[in-house]
Image (cartoon, rainbow, N blue to C red):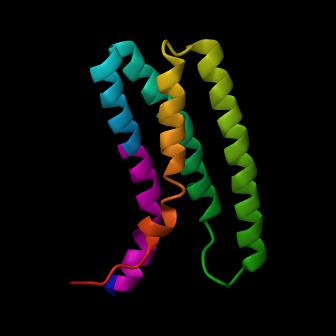
Amino acid sequence: MHSSARRRELAWQRLPLAQLMSMAVIGLLALWGAGLGAMHSALLGGGVALLPTIYFLWRGLRVRGGRRPRTSVFNFYQAAVGKFGLTVALFVMVFVAAPPSNPTFFFIAYVAAHSMHWLTPWLLRDRPTP
């Protein structure tokens, strides 16, 4: 397989990996600064951002290419609505079933994982091959 085609094929994986890395960094900082409960809250916050993103990528990128644009657009909108619903459901589940012991780290990790979307153009850009 040609390296540029392979690179485009695997580009979607960079966003969840960046979110996972930000979640891990915030979790370690929370553990170091405030203890195990804060780390647990940070991991919950990162998970609330990460799981809907993975769902969106799975659902929205099922049909690729220009063969069926109507199906691609439908999948994209369906993925966006599903991501929103999953985000709301995860927030409700976290705050009702297992309230975070440190809401500050929960929201810091959530915002940090979500800020990875701003880096998506940089993460997905084509890099020159060595």
Q: Nearer the viewer, residue 126 or 74?
A: 126
Give the residue displayed 75% in from the left and 69% down from the top.
73
* Magenta span main SS: helix
Is residue 13 magenta-colored? yes
Is residue 49 magenta-colored? no
Rendered position, 56 above or below 75: above
Rendered position, 2 above or below 98: below
Q: Nearer the viewer, residue 10 or 20?
A: 20
Give the residue displayed 77% in from the left and 65% down from the top.
74
Q: Which residues are magenta?
A: 4-21
| Total numbered circles | 0
Rendered-image quadrant of the C terminus: bottom left
Furthest-bottom residue in this view: 2
Rendered-image quadrant of the N terminus: bottom left
Furthest-left residue in this view: 130
Give the residue displayed 69% in from the left and 30% down from the top.
89
* Residue 114 seen in the current view: yes
Q: Is residue 94 left or right of residue 34?
A: right
Q: Nearer the viewer, residue 61 or 113?
A: 113
* Residue 47 seen in the current view: no
Quarter of the view holding residue 5: bottom left
